[in-house]
Amino acid sequence: MLWWSLLALQALCCRASRGLQHYQTAWGHYDVCKSQIYTEDGLAWDYMACQPEATDMTKYLRVTLDPPNITCGDPPEMYCALENPYMCNNECDASTEELAHPPELMFDFEGRNPTTFWQSSSWRKYPKPLQVNITLSWNKSIELTDDIVLTFESGRPEQMVLEKSLDFGRTWTPYQFYATDCLDAFTMEPKTASELTQLTLLDIICTEEYSRGYVWKNDKTVRFEIKERFALFAGPRLHNMASLYGQLDTTKKLRDFFTITDLRIKLLKPATGATMVDENNLSRYFYAISDVKVQGRCKCNLHANSCVFDKGRLGCECEHNTTGPDCSRCKKHYHGRAWSVGSYLPIPKGTANICIPSMNGPVHRANASSLGVVNRNKGRPAGFLRTFTKTQQITAS
């Protein structure tokens, strides 16, 4: 009998521990939208702000290139190494799978040997600029949660711009400029993200950090530093996320800065490795990207803790009587007050700002038996992906 009592006590402690973990150490995930509580009137719901867990968003994008025929291999072409124009052993042939380098290879599983990558045609039309626009589209508002990282198989570009759109590609604004010489390329003084302050966080800068010298031998990455900007409020190790969430809650421009529907990588000038282009060896100059990382979450306005990918589209699974791809409006008969985004404040549960029944609409009375299991994926690993016959569901851990 004592043994069974100990087991029951242990189970109770585990449940209490998981609850404390949500409210004390893992509150920044906001992974619970509602919980059952007992009141004087009986069982009721306590609503909280909630959002999906961050995940690799490159699994859900559509990529387009401009010009569309800029990918190498049609016709087949031989490429030479930038540092050695006589080392020419890189062949691209679109008609042969082993030698083709289509854009999808920017997003495949890394760690393969040899490395897979997208590659452009060479600068064979020099001095006409070799320029490429790579557009990543989600058809959904996305909130960035980590650095955007591009890994180049070629030398890193000498001139490049990263742009964002908030309106599905109708308008674009720059995120950051990259150049070996910012003054010459963009008439901007060079700056790094580490020089930004809370007051200048939204400034658009040009950096030379990722473009100068024979950099492909050591580091092939180009970054847009999200975490370094987060750290201006949350501290160098992001230990004070409450401060960051407080700023995001009260400053719409800050929220919009980290929100996108589309990204555009504008490659303007390839690596040349020297001050002058060698016109006798133009096959040395091209772009090649082996990996693109975009970590983020579906933007659900703090009204959903999961997002579904169905028929090629992402959409929030809305709670709080809200609806729409971003949970950005109240459901029918729930316009008792104007829709509002959820709030991170007060920490740690936030404010749900649920839509309430309209005065002339049907009254919805929640009860425990009809509402299912709260946070149904608790205990599964972060980023867990559950697959259905026709839908994929991204759930918070």
Image (cartoon, rainbow, N blue to C red):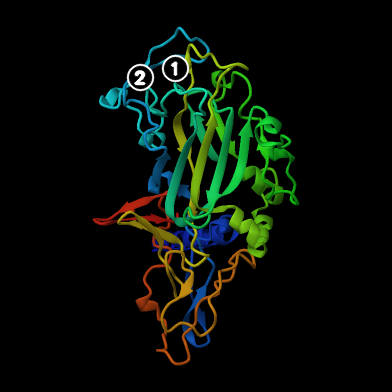
User: What's the mark number on residue 77?
Assistant: 2
The residue that appears at 35% across and 28% down in the rendered structure is: 101
Q: Amino acid at mark 2?
A: Glu
User: What's the mark number on residue 341?
Assistant: none
Q: Is residue 34 above or below residue 114?
A: below
Does residue 275 appear in this view? yes
Q: Is residue 224 above or below residue 214?
A: below
Specify the quadrant that holds the N terminus. bottom left
Q: Report which residue position mark 1 lands on.
A: 283
Residue that sits furthest to the left in the current view: 389
Nearer to us in this view, 294 or 23: 294
- Left or right of 270 on screen, residue 89: left
User: Considering the numbered disc 1 on the image, is that residue within a helix, a strand or a loop?
Assistant: helix
Q: Position of residue 98 (x, y in %)?
A: 29, 23
- Left or right of 155 on screen, residue 228: right
User: Considering the numbered disc 2 on the image, is that residue within a helix, a strand or a loop?
Assistant: strand
Specify the quadrant that holds the C terminus. bottom left
Q: Position of residue 251 (x, y in %)?
A: 67, 62
Q: Are marks 2 and 1 in contact (CB under 8 Å)?
A: yes
The residue that appears at 44% across and 14% down in the rendered structure is: 80
Q: Position of residue 39 (x, y in %)?
A: 52, 83
Marks 2 and 1, how far apart in space?
8 Å
